[in-house]
Image: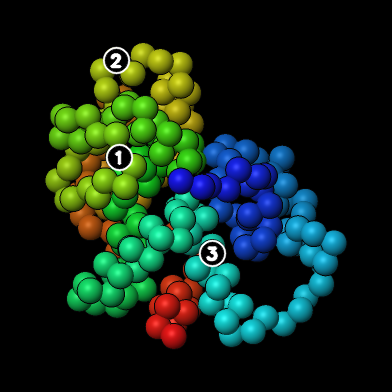
């Protein structure tokens, strides 16, 4: 499957907000977004007024890039959200939050969603005691996610544990860093999702 392989910091600048795609670098003073918050390219400093379609498209692209999805995957999640009861835009974000790679990231067991996706792919995690290598696996309330016994002693997870100690965990997850384990204690709610996005614009875009 085709994926963007260029400089990811340009994506943050393009969307006008930090997408935290580079892990710890995004929290440091070395983050390029801090010194160059304007869009990339020779016309980046211009502040042209965006059309309604342009605003809707930017919100969609922002969320796709944040969670690392391609258009077909993203549309699939939107269709699922539309079939659910409730507000479609909020349903969409909740479905994306329930992905295993996102949960690993939220627990601090991956410095970015991209790294969390790679760690899941490489078989470092179990869900309820069974190895899961599918990043899009949807977790449920009560699921226990933990690092495999063979992986716990690796320098990578020692580093991740130290980094995670300084960061809070979202309310719908509980975390046991000593044992590199997390539990889904509730379904994610919109107020728990700390991303700056107007999801109603995505709904408007796909409803045309």
The picture quadrant where one finds residue 58 is: bottom right
Q: Nearer the viewer, residue 111 or 96?
A: 96
Lower sequence index among marks 3 and 1: 3
Q: Name the residue under label 3.
A: 61
Q: Could you tell me residue 29's position as x and y percent?
A: 70, 42
| Secondary structure under the numbered disc 3 in the rendered image | helix
Q: Could you tell me residue 55's position as x and y percent?
A: 59, 77
The answer to whether residue 176 is visible is no
Q: Which of marks 2 and 3 is in front?
A: 3
| Residue lying farthest to the right in this orientation | 42
Whole-number angstrom distance, CA of label 1 to CA of label 2? 19 Å
Q: Name the residue under label 2.
A: 150
| Secondary structure under the numbered disc 2 in the rendered image | helix
The picture quadrant where one finds residue 190 is: bottom left
Q: Which of marks 1 and 2 is in front?
A: 1
Q: Which colour style is shown?
A: rainbow
Q: What residue lies at 41% left-to-right and 27% top-to-bottom?
A: 161
Q: What residue lies at 36% left-to-right and 14% top-to-bottom?
A: 153
Q: Are marks 1 and 2 in contact (CB under 8 Å)?
A: no
Q: In which quarter of the image is the C terminus?
A: bottom left
Q: Could you tell me residue 106's position as x and y percent?
A: 38, 45
Question: In the image, 136: left or right of 142?
Answer: right
| Residue lying farthest to the front in this orientation | 1
Lower sequence index among marks 2 and 3: 3
Q: Residue 134 carries which label?
A: 1
The answer to whether residue 102 is visible is yes
Q: Could you tell me residue 114's position as x and y percent?
A: 48, 41
Question: In the image, 202: left or right of 92?
Answer: right
Q: What residue lies at 43% left-to-right and 34% top-to-bottom?
A: 118
69 up-or-down from 145: above or below: below
71 up-or-down from 184: above or below: below
The picture quadrant where one finds residue 36 is: bottom right
């Amino acid at each position: 499957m085709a994926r963007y392989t260029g400089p990811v910091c340009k994506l943050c600048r393009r969307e006008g907000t930090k997408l935290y795609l580079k892990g710890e670098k995004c929290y440091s003073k070395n983050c390029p977004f801090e010194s160059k918050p304007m869009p990339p390219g020779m016309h980046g400093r211009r502040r042209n007024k965006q059309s309604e379609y342009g605003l809707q498209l930017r919100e969609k692209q922002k969320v796709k890039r944040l969670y690392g999805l391609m258009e077909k995957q993203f549309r699939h999640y939107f269709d699922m959200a539309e079939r659910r009861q409730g507000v479609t835009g909020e349903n969409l974000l909740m479905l994306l939050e329930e992905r295993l790679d996102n949960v690993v990231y939220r627990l601090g067991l991956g410095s970015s969603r991209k790294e969390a996706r790679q760690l899941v792919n490489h078989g470092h995690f179990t869900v309820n005691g069974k190895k899961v290598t599918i990043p899009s696996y949807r977790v449920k309330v009560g699921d226990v996610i933990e690092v495999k016994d063979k992986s716990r002693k690796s320098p990578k997870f020692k580093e991740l544990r130290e980094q995670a100690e300084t960061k809070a965990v979202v309310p719908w997850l509980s975390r046991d860093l000593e044992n590199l384990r997390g539990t889904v204690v509730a379904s994610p709610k919109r107020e728990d999702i700390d991303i700056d996005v107007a999801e109603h614009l995505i709904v408007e875009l796909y409803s045309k």
